[in-house]
Image (tube, grey):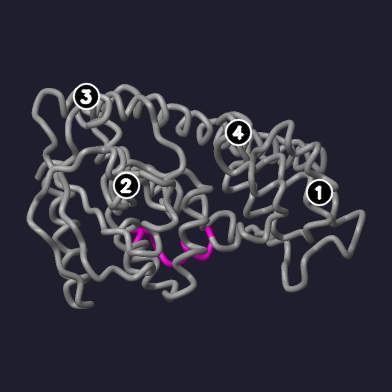
Amino acid sequence: MSTNDVALSEQDEALSLLVKHGVTFSDSTKFDLSTLRRMAEQPRTDFDEAKLASLEASTKLLGQLQDGFVRPLNDEEVAALPKGSPVRYEIVDGERRSIVCDRLGEQFRARIAYGLTPDLQFTLSVALNFNRAEHNILETVNVCKRLKQHHTVPEIAKIIGRSEPGVYQFLSLLELHPEIFAYLGPPHKREEQLRMSAGLILVRLTQEAQMEIWPKLKEEPTQRRAQALVQQKTAEDGKALRPGKKLGKMNASDAKRTIKALGGRAAAILDRCTPEVLRSIGESEREKLFTSVATIVDDLQMLKGELDFTGAFAAAAKKSAN
Protein backbone atom coordinates (compact mmCIF):
# COMPACT_ATOMS: atom_id res chain seq x y z
CA MET A 1 0.00 0.00 0.00
CA SER A 2 1.39 3.39 -0.97
CA THR A 3 1.68 6.44 1.28
CA ASN A 4 -1.12 8.06 -0.69
CA ASP A 5 -3.34 4.99 -0.18
CA VAL A 6 -2.73 5.23 3.58
CA ALA A 7 -3.61 8.94 3.54
CA LEU A 8 -6.81 8.26 1.59
CA SER A 9 -7.80 5.53 4.06
CA GLU A 10 -7.30 7.91 6.99
CA GLN A 11 -9.24 10.59 5.15
CA ASP A 12 -12.20 8.25 4.52
CA GLU A 13 -12.23 7.26 8.20
CA ALA A 14 -12.21 10.91 9.31
CA LEU A 15 -15.01 11.79 6.87
CA SER A 16 -17.19 8.95 8.13
CA LEU A 17 -16.85 10.30 11.67
CA LEU A 18 -17.80 13.82 10.55
CA VAL A 19 -20.82 12.63 8.56
CA LYS A 20 -22.14 11.06 11.77
CA HIS A 21 -21.99 14.55 13.30
CA GLY A 22 -24.07 16.04 10.48
CA VAL A 23 -21.21 17.47 8.40
CA THR A 24 -21.80 17.47 4.62
CA PHE A 25 -19.34 17.90 1.76
CA SER A 26 -19.40 19.39 -1.71
CA ASP A 27 -17.85 17.78 -4.77
CA SER A 28 -14.22 18.51 -5.58
CA THR A 29 -13.82 22.20 -6.49
CA LYS A 30 -10.89 24.33 -7.65
CA PHE A 31 -10.14 27.52 -5.69
CA ASP A 32 -8.02 30.57 -6.37
CA LEU A 33 -5.59 30.88 -3.46
CA SER A 34 -6.69 34.50 -2.97
CA THR A 35 -10.09 33.27 -1.75
CA LEU A 36 -8.57 31.12 1.01
CA ARG A 37 -6.97 31.79 4.39
CA ARG A 38 -5.02 29.47 6.68
CA MET A 39 -6.81 27.87 9.60
CA ALA A 40 -6.69 30.07 12.70
CA GLU A 41 -5.90 27.06 14.94
CA GLN A 42 -3.64 25.30 12.44
CA PRO A 43 -1.76 22.66 14.52
CA ARG A 44 1.35 22.91 12.34
CA THR A 45 3.50 25.99 12.82
CA ASP A 46 6.75 24.68 11.32
CA PHE A 47 6.95 23.52 7.69
CA ASP A 48 9.96 21.46 6.58
CA GLU A 49 11.27 23.16 3.45
CA ALA A 50 12.87 19.97 2.12
CA LYS A 51 9.55 18.13 2.35
CA LEU A 52 7.73 21.04 0.73
CA ALA A 53 10.22 20.94 -2.14
CA SER A 54 9.64 17.18 -2.52
CA LEU A 55 5.87 17.69 -2.55
CA GLU A 56 6.28 20.50 -5.08
CA ALA A 57 8.27 18.26 -7.42
CA SER A 58 5.69 15.49 -7.11
CA THR A 59 2.77 17.89 -7.69
CA LYS A 60 4.48 19.41 -10.71
CA LEU A 61 4.88 15.97 -12.24
CA LEU A 62 1.60 14.31 -11.25
CA GLY A 63 -0.69 17.15 -10.22
CA GLN A 64 -2.48 17.47 -6.86
CA LEU A 65 -3.28 13.86 -6.00
CA GLN A 66 -5.57 14.45 -3.03
CA ASP A 67 -8.30 16.99 -2.32
CA GLY A 68 -8.01 19.33 0.61
CA PHE A 69 -10.91 20.55 2.74
CA VAL A 70 -12.13 24.09 3.30
CA ARG A 71 -15.03 25.57 5.23
CA PRO A 72 -17.03 28.66 4.27
CA LEU A 73 -16.58 31.73 6.48
CA ASN A 74 -19.71 32.87 8.29
CA ASP A 75 -21.14 36.38 7.90
CA GLU A 76 -19.37 37.70 11.02
CA GLU A 77 -16.00 36.42 9.80
CA VAL A 78 -16.51 37.96 6.37
CA ALA A 79 -17.52 41.30 7.93
CA ALA A 80 -14.32 41.28 10.01
CA LEU A 81 -12.08 40.99 6.93
CA PRO A 82 -10.31 44.03 5.45
CA LYS A 83 -12.54 45.91 3.01
CA GLY A 84 -12.42 44.36 -0.46
CA SER A 85 -10.84 41.09 0.72
CA PRO A 86 -11.72 38.18 -1.62
CA VAL A 87 -11.27 35.58 1.16
CA ARG A 88 -14.38 33.46 1.68
CA TYR A 89 -13.03 30.10 2.87
CA GLU A 90 -10.65 28.74 5.50
CA ILE A 91 -8.36 25.78 4.84
CA VAL A 92 -9.12 22.89 7.18
CA ASP A 93 -6.83 20.32 5.60
CA GLY A 94 -4.20 20.70 2.88
CA GLU A 95 -2.15 23.77 3.78
CA ARG A 96 1.09 22.19 2.53
CA ARG A 97 -0.62 21.34 -0.77
CA SER A 98 -1.99 24.90 -1.01
CA ILE A 99 1.53 26.33 -0.50
CA VAL A 100 2.83 24.13 -3.31
CA CYS A 101 -0.07 25.08 -5.61
CA ASP A 102 0.70 28.74 -4.94
CA ARG A 103 4.36 28.22 -5.87
CA LEU A 104 3.37 26.44 -9.07
CA GLY A 105 0.72 29.03 -9.96
CA GLU A 106 -2.00 26.36 -9.81
CA GLN A 107 -5.46 26.45 -8.28
CA PHE A 108 -6.01 24.46 -5.10
CA ARG A 109 -8.46 21.56 -5.31
CA ALA A 110 -10.64 20.95 -2.27
CA ARG A 111 -14.07 19.95 -1.01
CA ILE A 112 -16.21 22.34 1.00
CA ALA A 113 -17.25 21.08 4.45
CA TYR A 114 -20.57 22.43 5.75
CA GLY A 115 -21.60 22.28 9.41
CA LEU A 116 -18.16 22.10 11.01
CA THR A 117 -18.04 23.24 14.64
CA PRO A 118 -14.69 24.68 15.85
CA ASP A 119 -13.95 21.45 17.74
CA LEU A 120 -14.82 19.21 14.79
CA GLN A 121 -12.74 21.39 12.49
CA PHE A 122 -9.69 21.16 14.77
CA THR A 123 -10.16 17.42 15.29
CA LEU A 124 -10.39 16.80 11.53
CA SER A 125 -7.24 18.83 10.87
CA VAL A 126 -5.29 16.99 13.56
CA ALA A 127 -6.53 13.51 12.61
CA LEU A 128 -5.49 14.01 8.98
CA ASN A 129 -2.22 15.87 9.56
CA PHE A 130 -0.71 13.83 12.39
CA ASN A 131 -0.49 10.74 10.21
CA ARG A 132 1.53 12.52 7.52
CA ALA A 133 4.56 14.80 7.88
CA GLU A 134 5.92 14.68 11.43
CA HIS A 135 5.13 17.37 13.97
CA ASN A 136 7.65 18.77 16.44
CA ILE A 137 7.20 18.32 20.19
CA LEU A 138 5.93 21.86 20.74
CA GLU A 139 3.18 21.42 18.13
CA THR A 140 2.20 18.04 19.56
CA VAL A 141 1.95 19.31 23.14
CA ASN A 142 -0.20 22.27 22.07
CA VAL A 143 -2.46 19.96 20.05
CA CYS A 144 -2.93 17.64 23.04
CA LYS A 145 -3.72 20.66 25.22
CA ARG A 146 -6.37 21.88 22.76
CA LEU A 147 -7.95 18.44 22.28
CA LYS A 148 -8.07 17.91 26.06
CA GLN A 149 -10.82 20.54 26.23
CA HIS A 150 -13.33 18.16 24.61
CA HIS A 151 -11.70 14.71 24.48
CA THR A 152 -10.41 12.06 26.88
CA VAL A 153 -6.79 10.90 26.77
CA PRO A 154 -7.74 7.58 25.06
CA GLU A 155 -9.60 9.59 22.39
CA ILE A 156 -6.64 11.94 21.92
CA ALA A 157 -4.34 8.94 21.52
CA LYS A 158 -6.52 7.61 18.68
CA ILE A 159 -6.82 11.02 17.00
CA ILE A 160 -3.07 11.69 16.86
CA GLY A 161 -1.97 8.06 16.49
CA ARG A 162 0.02 7.85 19.74
CA SER A 163 -0.16 5.67 22.85
CA GLU A 164 -2.08 6.82 25.92
CA PRO A 165 1.11 6.98 28.07
CA GLY A 166 2.65 9.07 25.29
CA VAL A 167 -0.25 11.55 25.44
CA TYR A 168 0.12 11.83 29.22
CA GLN A 169 3.82 12.59 28.73
CA PHE A 170 3.08 15.34 26.20
CA LEU A 171 0.52 16.88 28.56
CA SER A 172 2.95 16.76 31.49
CA LEU A 173 5.31 19.05 29.56
CA LEU A 174 2.75 21.82 30.08
CA GLU A 175 4.14 21.97 33.63
CA LEU A 176 7.39 23.45 32.31
CA HIS A 177 8.06 27.13 32.98
CA PRO A 178 6.73 29.08 29.94
CA GLU A 179 10.21 30.35 29.05
CA ILE A 180 11.60 26.81 29.04
CA PHE A 181 8.50 25.38 27.32
CA ALA A 182 9.19 27.61 24.30
CA TYR A 183 12.47 25.72 23.76
CA LEU A 184 10.64 22.50 22.83
CA GLY A 185 10.52 23.61 19.18
CA PRO A 186 11.03 26.40 16.62
CA PRO A 187 11.97 29.17 16.27
CA HIS A 188 14.88 27.79 18.30
CA LYS A 189 17.44 25.81 16.28
CA ARG A 190 17.26 22.04 16.57
CA GLU A 191 20.51 21.85 18.56
CA GLU A 192 19.15 24.45 21.01
CA GLN A 193 15.81 22.73 21.56
CA LEU A 194 15.06 20.98 24.84
CA ARG A 195 14.89 17.21 24.36
CA MET A 196 11.55 15.71 25.37
CA SER A 197 13.28 13.24 27.67
CA ALA A 198 15.03 16.14 29.43
CA GLY A 199 11.74 18.03 29.74
CA LEU A 200 10.06 15.03 31.36
CA ILE A 201 12.77 15.04 34.03
CA LEU A 202 12.64 18.80 34.50
CA VAL A 203 8.88 18.89 35.18
CA ARG A 204 9.51 17.08 38.44
CA LEU A 205 10.72 20.41 39.81
CA THR A 206 8.70 23.49 40.68
CA GLN A 207 8.81 26.13 37.95
CA GLU A 208 10.94 28.33 40.20
CA ALA A 209 13.49 25.54 40.65
CA GLN A 210 13.38 24.82 36.91
CA MET A 211 14.44 28.39 36.14
CA GLU A 212 17.30 28.21 38.66
CA ILE A 213 18.97 25.31 36.81
CA TRP A 214 17.85 26.33 33.30
CA PRO A 215 20.93 28.47 32.47
CA LYS A 216 23.15 25.38 32.91
CA LEU A 217 20.74 22.98 31.20
CA LYS A 218 20.34 25.40 28.30
CA GLU A 219 24.03 24.90 27.48
CA GLU A 220 23.40 21.16 26.96
CA PRO A 221 19.62 20.44 26.85
CA THR A 222 19.96 16.65 27.06
CA GLN A 223 18.41 13.99 29.27
CA ARG A 224 21.74 13.16 30.88
CA ARG A 225 22.40 16.79 31.81
CA ALA A 226 18.85 17.28 33.09
CA GLN A 227 19.10 14.20 35.31
CA ALA A 228 22.34 15.38 36.88
CA LEU A 229 21.13 18.94 37.48
CA VAL A 230 17.76 17.86 38.90
CA GLN A 231 19.41 15.40 41.28
CA GLN A 232 21.86 18.08 42.41
CA LYS A 233 19.07 20.62 42.90
CA THR A 234 16.87 18.27 44.94
CA ALA A 235 19.83 17.30 47.11
CA GLU A 236 20.46 20.99 47.88
CA ASP A 237 16.83 22.05 48.23
CA GLY A 238 14.20 19.69 49.60
CA LYS A 239 11.42 21.99 48.40
CA ALA A 240 12.55 21.95 44.77
CA LEU A 241 10.43 18.91 43.87
CA ARG A 242 6.84 19.53 42.87
CA PRO A 243 4.28 17.96 45.24
CA GLY A 244 3.68 14.32 44.37
CA LYS A 245 6.82 14.06 42.24
CA LYS A 246 9.61 11.64 43.06
CA LEU A 247 12.98 11.00 41.48
CA GLY A 248 12.58 7.38 40.51
CA LYS A 249 15.53 5.12 41.20
CA MET A 250 16.07 1.60 39.97
CA ASN A 251 17.33 -1.19 42.17
CA ALA A 252 19.62 -3.90 40.79
CA SER A 253 16.69 -6.13 39.81
CA ASP A 254 14.99 -3.27 37.91
CA ALA A 255 18.22 -2.45 36.08
CA LYS A 256 18.83 -6.06 34.97
CA ARG A 257 15.25 -6.49 33.77
CA THR A 258 15.30 -3.17 31.88
CA ILE A 259 18.63 -3.87 30.14
CA LYS A 260 17.48 -7.35 29.10
CA ALA A 261 14.26 -5.90 27.69
CA LEU A 262 16.30 -3.27 25.83
CA GLY A 263 18.39 -6.01 24.23
CA GLY A 264 15.31 -7.90 23.12
CA ARG A 265 13.71 -4.80 21.57
CA ALA A 266 16.95 -3.87 19.80
CA ALA A 267 17.21 -7.36 18.29
CA ALA A 268 13.60 -7.22 17.06
CA ILE A 269 14.14 -3.78 15.49
CA LEU A 270 17.34 -4.86 13.75
CA ASP A 271 15.57 -7.93 12.31
CA ARG A 272 12.96 -5.69 10.66
CA CYS A 273 15.12 -2.69 9.68
CA THR A 274 16.98 -4.42 6.87
CA PRO A 275 19.51 -2.51 4.71
CA GLU A 276 16.98 -2.58 1.86
CA VAL A 277 14.34 -0.89 4.04
CA LEU A 278 16.78 1.75 5.32
CA ARG A 279 17.96 2.57 1.80
CA SER A 280 14.34 3.23 0.78
CA ILE A 281 14.03 6.09 3.31
CA GLY A 282 14.42 9.59 1.87
CA GLU A 283 17.81 11.27 2.28
CA SER A 284 16.62 14.14 4.50
CA GLU A 285 14.71 11.71 6.73
CA ARG A 286 17.76 9.41 6.96
CA GLU A 287 19.82 12.32 8.26
CA LYS A 288 17.31 12.92 11.08
CA LEU A 289 17.22 9.21 11.92
CA PHE A 290 21.02 9.11 11.93
CA THR A 291 21.09 11.91 14.51
CA SER A 292 18.53 10.08 16.67
CA VAL A 293 20.45 6.80 16.48
CA ALA A 294 23.74 8.57 17.22
CA THR A 295 22.23 10.06 20.41
CA ILE A 296 20.98 6.61 21.49
CA VAL A 297 24.38 5.07 20.76
CA ASP A 298 26.09 7.75 22.88
CA ASP A 299 23.75 6.96 25.79
CA LEU A 300 24.33 3.21 25.37
CA GLN A 301 28.09 3.75 25.27
CA MET A 302 27.80 5.61 28.58
CA LEU A 303 25.78 2.69 30.01
CA LYS A 304 28.32 0.19 28.67
CA GLY A 305 31.17 2.19 30.17
CA GLU A 306 29.41 2.31 33.54
CA LEU A 307 28.92 -1.47 33.47
CA ASP A 308 32.59 -1.98 32.55
CA PHE A 309 33.63 0.30 35.41
CA THR A 310 31.41 -1.32 38.03
CA GLY A 311 32.47 -4.78 36.86
CA ALA A 312 36.16 -3.90 37.06
CA PHE A 313 35.61 -2.27 40.46
CA ALA A 314 33.89 -5.39 41.80
CA ALA A 315 36.67 -7.65 40.44
CA ALA A 316 39.35 -5.46 42.04
CA ALA A 317 37.53 -5.45 45.37
CA LYS A 318 37.23 -9.26 45.31
CA LYS A 319 40.93 -9.64 44.45
CA SER A 320 41.86 -7.30 47.27
CA ALA A 321 39.75 -9.26 49.74
CA ASN A 322 41.57 -12.47 48.82
Q: Which residues are magenta?
A: 159-170
Q: Secondary structure at mark 4?
A: loop
Image mark for residue 211: 1
Residue at coordinates 59% horizontally, 42% vertically from top-left? 195
Which badge, 4 or 2, is on the more N-terminal residue?
2
Q: Nearer the viewer, residue 253 or 293?
A: 293
Q: Which residue is mark 3?
A: 104
Of circles 3 and 2, the one toward us is 2
Which badge, 3 or 4, is on the more N-terminal residue?
3
Amino acid bearing label 3: Leu
How packed mark 3 is, by other alpha carbons closer than 10 Å (few <14, some 14-19, many 20 or more), is few
What is the C-alpha distance between the residues marked 4 and 1?
Answer: 18 Å
Give coordinates of residue 29: x percent, y percent.
11, 48
Quadrant of the drawing holding the C terminus: top right
What is the C-alpha distance between the residues marked 1 and 3?
Answer: 47 Å
Of circles 1 and 3, the one toward us is 3
* Image quadrant where residue 293 sits: top left
What is the C-alpha distance between the residues marked 4 and 2?
Answer: 32 Å
Q: Which residue is mark 2?
A: 87
Asked if marks 3 and 4 touch (Cβ < 8 Å), the reply is no
Asked if marks 1 and 3 touch (Cβ < 8 Å), the reply is no
Residue at coordinates 38% horizontally, 51% vertically from top-left? 39
Q: Nearer the viewer, residue 60 or 254?
A: 60
Of circles 3 and 4, the one toward us is 3
Give coordinates of residue 134: x percent, y percent.
37, 42
How packed mark 1 is, by other alpha carbons closer than 10 Å (few <14, some 14-19, many 20 or more), is some
Of circles 1 and 2, the one toward us is 2
